[in-house]
Amino acid sequence: MVKTSSMNKVFENLNNLKNAFKIGEKVVPIIQSLTEFMHEIVPLLENINSSISESAHQMPKAANQINDVTSATELATTEILDLVDQISNRIMEIETAITEVISEQDERDEIFNKLKELIKDNPDALLLSEKLYEKNSNSELFSFVKDKLGLINDDSFKITMSLQVQDITSQQLLAVNHLIENVMGKLQTLMSQIDSSDLKKEFANLQIEVPEDAHYDPNAKYNHDEERQQKVDDIVEKQKEQASQDEIDKLFA
Amino acid sequence: MDLKFLVVDDSVTMRRIVVNSLKALGYVNYVEAADGQEALGQLAADSTINFIITDWNMPNMTGLELTQAVRTDANTASMPILMVTTRGVKEDIVQALQAKVNNYVVKPFTPQVLKEKLDQILEKL
């Protein structure tokens, strides 16, 4: 006589088993999808690998181009600095000449004063000498020019200081080069690891082996696609037609 | 004091800019080096050099390494050193000060800043 408690235990175990089967039925399609994903991944990995190989070949060219840019900008900057130096030197020469002219003004003033003293009794001559003095007195103009030259010199010096940008950008470009090299190196290592391992082979051959006594369909899909049923119906119809022909053939056999 | 500067930077552009800045301030005696190693060679060959203006990031020997080498040599241990660099983070500045640079300028610098930092060093000499 089976005890009630034992029966309850059996029912409980059956229930647990039933739940396990339900979970299994849910999990198997997921694993199947994962396997299909792995199959799909292989060609993607191959694509990525070939892209990376191509990029790796291009990388030295990119690095060289970056270095060329740095060299070209350094050359251009040097030429600009040469020109700025020339401008500064010429301004200095002009300033020196103007300073000399301005310094001679005192001497001119002295000469004119002596002349005026000598001709003070001749009003016409005095008037003419004063007009001549005014025409020759350009000290204000020269001072104006000298001030402007000073400003030009300041501006050209500012150009010099702003060319520090070349040094800063060349360092930034070197950093970019280094970063590209690092990234490509790491990706290449990663891809060669995937290549050299058996992973690729494993993914390609990965299949779920269905045991002979399995009571589940590994290809089962939850899919409302009407075309699937139509395909089934077409196959069924063809089989029926075949069966009819077979029957006829049997009659004549 | 007759100053003779050693201007150290791997960038030709920056060396010219520093030199032009020094000239604008009235300092006309200078020599140049492209890295720390070359700078040490200049120091060994020319005992009239008495002020170093150096970059940090350079091949062969950095400005920091140059500073450390200068400070450990009895002949140059007290030579004023001004670091002129793009490095501006606190850790770098602290590191440079620990290596005993006298002052620190970040690029890009203005002539006024360079003058100010030079003057600060010269006042203490």
Image: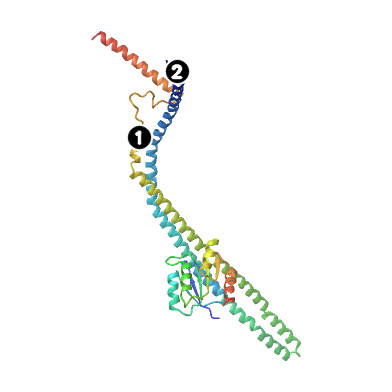
Left or right of B51: which side holds A245? Answer: left
Left or right of A11: which side holds A192? Answer: left
Q: Which of these two is toward me, A24 or A95? A: A24
Quadrant location of the N terminus of chain A in the rendered image = top left
Residue A68 seen in render: yes
Residue A243 place in picture, x, y as percent: 31, 13
Left or right of A190: which side holds B103? Answer: right
The chain ID associated with circle 2 is A
Residue extending farthest to the left is A253
Q: Dot 1: few (<14), some (14–19), or many (≥20) neighbours within 10 Å?
A: some
* Circles 1, 2 touching at the beta carbon (< 8 Å): no
Residue B20 place in picture, x, y as percent: 53, 72
Name the residue type under label 2: Lys
Residue extending farthest to the top is A251
Residue A163 seen in render: no
Q: CA distance from mark 1 to mark 2?
A: 49 Å
Q: Which residue is mark 2?
A: A3
Q: Which residue is mark 1?
A: A206
The chain ID associated with circle 1 is A
Identify the residue at horizontal 66%, vertical 83% (top origin).
Answer: A105
The numbered disc on residue B15 is none
Q: Which of these two is toward me, B23 or A113? A: B23
Badge nearest the viewer, 1 or 2: 2
Quadrant location of the C terminus of chain A in the rendered image = top left
Identify the residue at horizontal 33%, vertical 39% (top origin).
Answer: A201
Residue A121 place in picture, x, y as percent: 76, 90
How many numbered marks have been drawn onto this rendered protein structure?
Answer: 2
Residue B34 place in picture, x, y as percent: 45, 69
